[in-house]
């Protein structure tokens, strides 16, 4: 019964956090003189419906999956690192590495067949993200440095390094304009004619299917393998893990490499699927920080991450249409921030739920003990 109550609480926490985010977001809209009902209604219409006909819009639904793909990868990356007991704040930089490397490889092989170029570009992007994450992982494992500080600084280092690479290192034949590469060829693209046609010419690509595959693979890794068990054990107690014969240093480095590998794949999907080229970025990629929020809201589970990524995609796409109702789209970001806030203080929600579920359980236990005094041993203890 206790396990069942705990599962119910775990499922209710993100749901309540989302509902509270919408409710308080609506209150803020009303405080500024906007209609929450009109705003949320317009958000849903923009995300799913055709504004002219009112029918389901395949293009917008395709774009929801386009946005969700990179978020799933960065959320999985954060989840793996978080399971090992530390925060990988460098997802943005690692995804950026994946984006640059995959585009570079795809542009450098314009005449090679797709069966060669696409796997190489994906692998290059994923490995570049893994290498970028290995640096703070090694520093944390061997020297005890704060992974939060190191990964934040790495975001800036990688951001300006990517700008230098595009402006000064890449061959001019790969460039379209200053700071903007050429579009990749069909042989390096994650898009297919079939997906483009069924989604009414959206940017829907195979990245979302790649993300779904890795949701299953990461679940299997973390729940069904020895390495996953070691990562979770080190996250819970590195000292006890060392005593049990596990190498916490090795596990920390491996988990960080896996985290960067997944974040790099997020950048690959962004490059080879969404944009089809690379252009210099003024700030860190939002998919890194949004991926952290998606992972927290989804409690780090594969199903939770999938649902959270879709929710964030709907909020981002639908928020663009809130201006039709006269509401600034920035209020959508307020909603997201409030949701993250309640996820961050989930212990408060858990405490409230424990108060709701707890007393009944305690009363039931007391009544059972009083009704069955023979369940105690001769010394007065429970059997």
Image: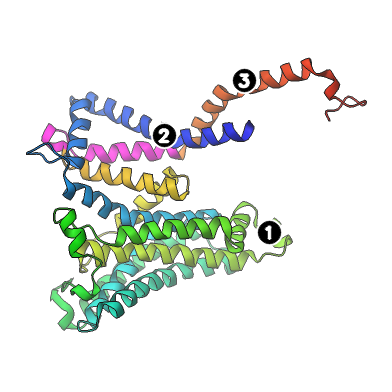
- Rendered view: 159 above or below 204: below
Residue 94 in view of the camera: no
Q: Which mark is residue 15?
A: 2
> Along the horizontal axis of the image, is 383 left or right of 202?
right
Distance from disc 2 to disc 3, alpha carbons, whole Å, reads 22 Å
> Along the horizontal axis of the image, is 126 left or right of 232?
left
**Which numbered disc flags the more N-terminal residue, 1 or 2?**
2
- Indicate the secondary structure of the residue bearing disc 1: helix
Residue picked out by circle 3 = 359
Q: Are marks 2 and 3 in contact (CB under 8 Å)?
A: no
Which residues are drawn in magenta? 322-343
Q: Quadrant of the N terminus?
A: top right
Residue picked out by circle 1 = 241
Residue 235 in view of the camera: yes
> Badge 1, how many Cα within 10 Å: few under 14, some, many 20+?
some
Residue under the image location 40 percent in, 73 percent down: 127
> Badge 2, how many Cα within 10 Å: few under 14, some, many 20+?
some
Magenta segment, prevailing SS (helix, strand or loop):
helix
- Indicate the secondary structure of the residue bearing disc 2: helix
Nearer to us: label 3 or label 1:
3
Horizontal and vertical percent position of residue 99: 29, 68
Q: Are marks 1 and 2 in contact (CB under 8 Å)?
A: no
Distance from disc 3 to disc 1, alpha carbons, whole Å, reads 36 Å
- Indicate the secondary structure of the residue bearing disc 3: helix
């Amino acid at each position: 019964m206790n396990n069942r109550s705990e599962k119910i609480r775990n499922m209710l926490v993100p749901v309540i956090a989302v509902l509270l985010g919408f409710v308080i977001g609506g209150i803020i809209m009303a405080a500024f003189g906007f209609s929450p009902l009109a705003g949320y209604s317009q958000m849903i219409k923009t995300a799913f419906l055709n504004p002219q006909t009112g029918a389901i819009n395949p293009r917008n639904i395709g774009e929801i999956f386009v946005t969700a793909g990179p978020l799933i990868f960065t959320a999985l990356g954060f989840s793996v690192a978080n399971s090992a007991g530390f925060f990988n704040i460098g997802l943005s930089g690692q995804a950026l590495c994946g984006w640059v490397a995959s585009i570079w490889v795809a542009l450098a092989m314009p005449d090679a067949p797709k069966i060669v170029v696409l796997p190489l570009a994906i692998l290059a992007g994923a490995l570049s993200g893994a290498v970028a994450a290995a640096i703070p992982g090694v520093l944390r494992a061997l020297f005890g440095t704060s992974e939060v500080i190191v990964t934040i600084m790495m975001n800036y280092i990688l951001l300006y390094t990517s700008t230098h690479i595009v402006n000064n290192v890449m061959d001019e034949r790969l460039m379209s304009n200053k700071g903007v590469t050429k579009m990749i060829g069909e042989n390096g693209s994650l898009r297919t004619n079939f997906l483009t046609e069924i989604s009414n010419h959206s940017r829907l690509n195979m990245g979302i299917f790649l993300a779904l595959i890795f949701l299953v693979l990461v679940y299997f890794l973390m729940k069904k393998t020895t390495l996953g068990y070691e990562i979770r054990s080190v996250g819970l107690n590195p000292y006890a893990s060392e005593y049990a014969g596990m190498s916490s240093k090795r596990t920390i480095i491996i988990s960080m490499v896996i985290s960067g590998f997944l974040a790099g794949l997020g950048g690959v999907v962004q490059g080879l699927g969404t944009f089809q080229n690379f252009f210099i970025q003024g700030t860190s990629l939002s998919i890194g920080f949004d991926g952290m929020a998606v992972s927290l809201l989804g409690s780090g589970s594969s199903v939770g991450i999938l649902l959270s990524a879709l929710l964030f995609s709907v909020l981002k796409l639908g928020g663009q249409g809130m201006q039709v109702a006269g509401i600034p789209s920035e209020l959508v970001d307020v909603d997201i921030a409030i949701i993250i806030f309640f996820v961050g203080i989930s212990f408060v929600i858990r405490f409230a739920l424990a108060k709701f579920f707890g007393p009944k359980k305690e009363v039931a236990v007391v009544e059972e003990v009083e009704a069955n005094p023979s369940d105690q041993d001769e010394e007065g203890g429970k059997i």
